[in-house]
Image (cartoon, coloured by chain):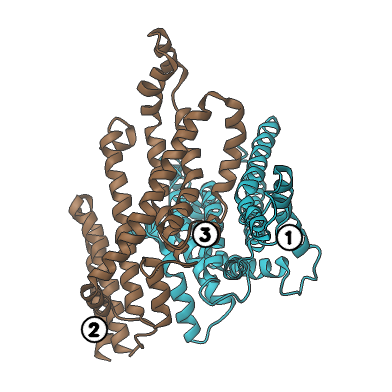
Chain colours: A cyan, B brown
Amino acid sequence: MRNILPILTVVATIVVLWYLAAVKLNSAWVYDQATRAGADMPAFSQVVSETMNQDRPVLPTPHQVGAELWKSTVGMAVTSKRSLVYHGWVTISATLLGFAIGTGLGVLLAVGIIHNRAMDMSVMPWAIASQTIPILAIAPMIIVVLNSLGLQGLVPKAIISAYLSFFPVVVGMVKGLRSPDQMQLDLLKTYNASAAGAFWKLRVPSSMPYLFASLKVGIAASLVGAIVGELPTGAVAGLGARLLSGSYYGQTVQIWAALFAAAIVAAGMVIVIGLIEKGTLRRMGMVR
Amino acid sequence: MSWVTLALAAWAGGWYVNVRLSHSRAARTRVGQLAVPVIFGITVLVLWEGLVRGLGVSPVILPPPSAVAARIGSSLPTLGADFWQTAVKGALTGYLLGCGAAVLTAIAIDRSPFLQKGLLPVGNFVAALPIVGVAPIMVMWFGFDWQSKAAVVVIMVFFPMLVNTVAGLKATDAMQRDLMATYSASYWQTLAKLRLPAAMPFIFNGLKISSTLALIGAIVAEFFGSPIVGMGFRINASIGQLALDMIWAEIAVAALAGSAFYGLVALIERRMTFWHPSQRT
């Protein structure tokens, strides 16, 4: 808790800088309006007050974004097409489905890799190399191709999310399942433990910290995948769609609100995984 | 059907060779370690080609690798222009600016533990956020050309780089710093001669993470608006024409550019941090 004060200071500084930037960026419009109306140049205090609440500001002020977030989450029926809860849920459901698929397949492949030498040598270099490739670039293509095959909505986005969370989980899980050292493996051998016994009683428990570290990376990647997956179909539903329609119609406040909603969702999911991690490791007696 | 049988036979053959190779003595050598993944990659391509041809998959769903290769060969100038626009102008500019700014910020807050305590959690938090979402805002501010893409990349790479550099600047231990103090070294001398070199492994880790992020940022930012050149633009435009071979060609270029970029950073790291245990062979 000693860190609260510094963090608050930094956050407060960012908010202040944000307001200053908003005044600077939005004042051009105010001066422009004044010139067009043929009026005198407005006084500085007047300019500042006018930059705070424009309809389509270049940079919306924090309280405008906050108000929009409040209005479109709490102040609106969840079923409304303008509700961020509705759009957020569209994105979250795709993210979670994809994350579950990607993690499941990733763990399976990792198990295969540690038990099969040929698989290890053929697949592992590609799994590592694939992390240096901008995989996200194929997201639009997956959406359109699956669309032409008759798959729409949740599943194509989930596939992109699965793809993005797959490789971090494979790499992390292989590392984790290999983390028991020779001494521990030898001990199990002296107990005459079977391969399955060694796997469940030693390898899986000791892989948990690695698994959770890659789950955190994976879920963040999944969310980005789901958001980007919403772009090519045009603005239908989801946080990505809100970003896109905001950018089409110049609704800057809407873009910022969607952006913050995405940030809150991402933070929430990482925190949830962190809590599960803490609980699991405590039950296993591995509290750090 | 013969294509399918051929492809499956090639797959089985490749797998058999790999199993034999990985259990033989060759698996210990460098050549063997390189050959196995290469054989695997080739069999995947052969399987892809054979299945697409044998099952008569429409080219608007999945083009065979040979069609993609032909497309790469026939549209080299376009691909080159796209690469220049997105990877060099957008991604590389933003990467250099963002990483440079992050390192300078890290050095600036180096003397203030208070700021570090505040900035690090915020930086870690921001690094996990879907920052590509700022792309539409940057496109609005900086226009359709590469400047907006570079701006997105700057924001994307800044925080991972900052967090890594700050961690790196803490990597010296008290004994080493005391030694510098006994030499009566000033703050800046200690920074230049001891702490920055010691931070290099961390800085390069940040540079490697950022190299991937930079290309992603530049490509995705183009989905929100771009001039009529660029990898993201081409992917988006080719989807409209169902020219999937062009998309795969762009993806191949992106993959090559991403790996080459990462490889280059790794190579420079090897040269500069040859003293670090992880680099000794």
* Pointers 3 and 2 within a single chain: yes
Indicate which label's residue lies in the foreground, 2 or 1. 1
Helix, strand or loop at label 2? It is: helix
Q: Chain of mark 1?
A: A
A251 on left or right of B28: right
Q: Residue at x 58, y 26 (%)?
A: B113
Viewer-nearest residue: A165 or B78: B78
Q: Residue at x 60, y 52 (%)?
A: A28
Helix, strand or loop at label 1? It is: helix
B272 on left or right of A237: left
Residue A68 image label: 1
Residue A93 image label: none
Q: Residue at x 78, y 62 (%)?
A: A71
Q: Locate the N terminus of chain A and report the quarter of the image it occupies.
A: top right
Rendering coords of residue A80 (x, y %)? 75, 74
Q: Are marks 2 and 1 in contact (CB under 8 Å)?
A: no
Rendering coords of residue A98 (x, y %)? 55, 68
Residue B135 image label: 3
Rendering coords of residue B94 (x, y %)? 41, 50
B24 on left or right of A270: left
**Nearest to N terminus: mark 3 or mark 2:** 2
Residue B6 image label: 2
Rendering coords of residue B16 (x, y %)? 25, 69
Q: Chain of mark 3?
A: B
Viewer-nearest residue: B254 or B139: B139
Q: Are marks 3 and 1 in contact (CB under 8 Å)?
A: no
User: Could you tell me the amino acid type at mark 1?
Assistant: Glu
* Pointers 3 and 1 within a single chain: no
